[in-house]
Structure formats: structure tokens, C-alpha cells
Amino acid sequence: MSVVSLLRRTVRLESRYVATRFVQQRALSGADVINALRPFYFAVHPDFFGQYPREREVNENSLKRLNGYLENLQKPGSRLLQPMKFSFYVRDTNSSDTQPDLLTSGFRSVSFTLHARDVLSTVTDILRSCSLPVEHMESLKGSAEACKRLPEAGTPFYRPIKWDKSYYAFTGFRDPEEELQQAKRAEPTLSLWLRNNEPEAAKKHSASLPRREEMKRLKEELCQKFSLADIWWQRSWGVAHRCCQLQSLSRLSQQNPEALVHLQGHTVVFADQSGMNASGHVMLGTMDVHHQWTKLFERLPSYRSLQQQTEWLKERISLLLGGIQVIHVESLGPVQPIAEHYAALNTFHKNLLSRRLRLHPRSLQGLSMMLETDRSTPTLHEMGHFIISTSCDPHKLQAFLQSHAHEARQRVRRRNQLQDEEAELMKVCLQSLSLRSLSKEPSVSCSQMLQCCERLLVQRSPLMQGLHVCVSHFYSVMQDGDLCIPWDWKS
């Protein structure tokens, strides 16, 4: 054997050894991670914040980001992640210990920054940051140490942890599964809940009517004066909050009308940060001052130029991939700035150009896809669109798209049919039940909404007449008198 061959063989063996150790130390994941974080999920799960929509939304968005962070951390061979900050509202799951920072509503605000090292230490940091127990992590630490002592093993030993009921009896911790079951059993019927809460909802709704009229007037005035396509809000803020935002924009238009000229034709979205999103909508940060909004308006021509480049990239990608359309749906994920969207499209386009694909120009016409930077394998969403990684291998992508195109078309037809049925049934409900409005949260699917509407028409409760109803996953009377009811309410 030559010296060169010997060196190559040594390098391959070393690489295999290092990669094996890396996977074993980093891939302590799956059900182990879920069970290790069970106290955390129980303390922050959005379903327990039904009476607090703002805190529920914060936890819901933070959980999506955290799950993506953990998923990336568990990928073999993934690069070290950048530090990321998270904010949660944590429920008091141990009533015997009083927390100094506990709010009167029964939860506290917690913020922490994760510095990716490995899955085990990251999970421990999450629990400690929220002042949650970490004693149950000892078994996982033992598994990690065992992996380090067995570098020749191909994959770490996988054993999901399901805590015995005696664990909760001995430690005094609350059993999340038992509490969820108790909450479901204690959930009232729709008719009982309406009888108990309709007077409060009607009172709040009557008090909000002047603010609703003012909000409608301001929105129409701004849209007409500056030729805006629409104005809407990223979050479910109350009517008073929305009025304040519209009044602030109206004052700016009076003080500096030239600044708003560039808004013509755009949709304005009041959001958490200022900029332009992937859909081309102008986002006005609700915490920003007029000076920052004015600076944004001055930069709109350059944003429009970037938007035109993204549209060009979408067309080029569509030509390369048989006519499939690249889409971005804000309701299916976090808000993506236009610059990030352009970067993702550009990376994906260059990746496609590196290989020659053989796709018929119209073989995938009528289908759509979304790009994600933190996904490893392509998938087909239940709504019929593909979810593709920007770094996906082009030939594997071609094979996946061709093999799943028929199924995707069937799902698209089914989605369109459900959406048409949903729109028609919602219109019938609105008229038959004499509702002011009927809407749903993005997390409620079309089939769930159809079931809910059909049952509402059967029950025909007169207590909802004249009110705004939102179909969600929980019961709540909002600050402006809107009713939130779960889609699977008890009859």
C-alpha cells in the first residue's frame, strides 16, 4: 500500500470516527427531548392561555421558533447555530412556591438566549431559565456519557421516556396528561358557556361600537387619501389599540403628507417591526416613532426594486421547475422580510443552475411550493403545496416533485373544494344566526370549520345574535366583546 493510499484511508477512518461521535453527542433527540421538555411544554403551552390572547400568541410564535431551533440542532452535520433569544410566559405549575416575578394572572415573563452547543445542554438551559426541575435529566446525561464511551456504535440507543404515575406522586409535580384530561372533562357545553358569558360580551361589544366606527372611518380615509390597497394588522390587537395606530398614521399624514406618497398601491400592515415583508406589504412597527416610519417610506423605492428582483427569480425558478409557482403564505409561518425572501430565492436559484434538470416546461403547472432555509428534506403539505429546502439536491428534488405531483393536484382540488364549502357555509351561518361577523383563527382547518358551522346551524343559539364570533381552540370573551369558541365545542 502506497503512502498516499494509507493517508487517504486514515483520513476516511478519522472522519468516520469524528462524525460518529458528533452524531452521538448531538443527536440525543426524538422522544427523549420531548419527554425531557415536558415540564416546559406544560408550563408554556398556548392552550393553557385561552383567557390571555396576547400571551398565548407570544408563546405560540416562540414555540414555533424554538422547535425549529431544536430541529436544526439535532440534524447530523449541521453547522453551529447563531445565538437566539426567546421569550415566554410561564405558568405557575407549583402553587406551593411563590414566585417574586409572578404576575397577578398566574404566570411570569421569561426571556433567555440559547447558545447552541449540544441538544442535552440546550434542553437543560431551557428548563433552568424557566426555573423548572432538571432532576429527570440525569438519565439522559447517563445515556450521553454511554454514547461517548461507545464511539464505534452506529447510532445512539433510542428509548422514549414515559413517566409512570408514581413519578408525579413521589415528586409532587403535576401530571400534564391528567390535567389536560381534567380540563377537557370540565369544559362546559356551548349553551351553558353562552348563558354565563353573553351578558358580558354584549356589554363589551356595546362599549366598543364608537371605537369600531372610528376605526372604520380612519381606515377608509387613509386608504382613499393615499390610494392604499388595504390596511390590516399582524396580531389580534383590540379595537382601541388599532384605533391608536391608525390615528398615529393619520397624524403623520397631516404633518408630513409628502412622506406617504410612496405608499400608493401598497398594503400597510401594522406589525412588530418596520420594513417590507415577502408579500410586498409595507410593515409599520407599532413600537416605532414617526421618524422611523418616515425613513422607511423614503426607502420604499429600493424595496420595490428588491421586490421586482424577487419576482424575476420566481419566474426563473418556475421555468426551471416545470411551471411550478413559488409562493409565500404569511399565515403558514413567521413574517419574513423581503431581504430574507430574496436571499432564499437567490440561493435556491443558484442551486438549481448548478445541475441540469429535465422537466417538461408545463409538467408542474398549477402547483406551488414554499421555500424554507431550515428544512432538510422536501415534503408535501396537506393543503397541496410543496415545502422545499433552499439547499435541496436538484436531482432528488426533481424525483420528489414528479413522484408526488399527482397527489399534490388531488390535495389542491380537495383544498379548493373545502375552501368553497367553508365560504358558503360561513355565509349561511352569518345570516341564519344573525351574527355581526364570523371568522376563524389560522390554526383552525377548513374541515374543522365546516364541522363547527354545521353544528352551529343545528343548535341555532339566539345568544350569539349581533355579536362577532371567532372560531378558535378555546372559550374566551375578548376585550371588545368578540366571542371565541372552540371548533369542537360540546353540545
Image: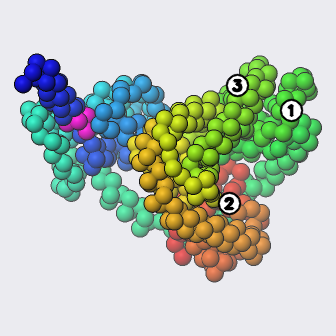
For the N terminus, give its image quadrant. top left
Residue indicated by mark 2: 439
Tell me if label 1 and label 3 are in contact, CB under 8 Å.
Answer: no
Scheme of colours in the image = rainbow
Q: Secondary structure at mark 2?
A: strand
Residue occupying the point 84% across, 29% down? 262
Residue indicated by mark 3: 288
Say what amino acid the circle numbered 3 marks. Asp
Q: Quadrant of residue 22?
A: top left
Image coordinates of residue 317 in percent, x first then y, are: 60, 43
Residue 233: mark: none
Residue indicated by mark 1: 250
Residue occupying the point 21% across, 51% down? 161
Q: Is 391 situated left or right of 317 in this image?
A: left
Q: Is 257 situated left or right of 304 in this image?
A: right
Above or below, 267 against 21 in this view is below
Question: Is 65 colored magenta in this rendering?
Answer: no
By secondary structure, the bulk of the magenta-drawn segment is best described as helix
Say what amino acid the circle numbered 1 marks. Ser
Q: Which residues are magenta?
A: 23-27
Q: Quadrant of residue 365?
A: bottom right
Could you give the CA–CA distance between mark 2 and mark 1, rounded to whole angstroms? 28 Å
Could you give the CA–CA distance between mark 2 and mark 3, rounded to whole angstroms? 30 Å
- Rate crowding at label 2 as few (under 14), some (14 to 19) or many (20 or more) other CA atoms within 10 Å: some
Q: Residue furthest front?
A: 2
Image coordinates of residue 208 in percent, x first then y, are: 78, 50
Residue occupying the point 38% across, 46% down? 41
Q: Earlier in the sequence, mark 1 or mark 3?
A: 1
Q: Is 126 situated left or right of 32 in this image?
A: right
- Rate crowding at label 3 as few (under 14), some (14 to 19) or many (20 or more) other CA atoms within 10 Å: few
Image coordinates of residue 285 in percent, x first then y, are: 69, 30
For the C terminus, give its image quadrant. bottom right
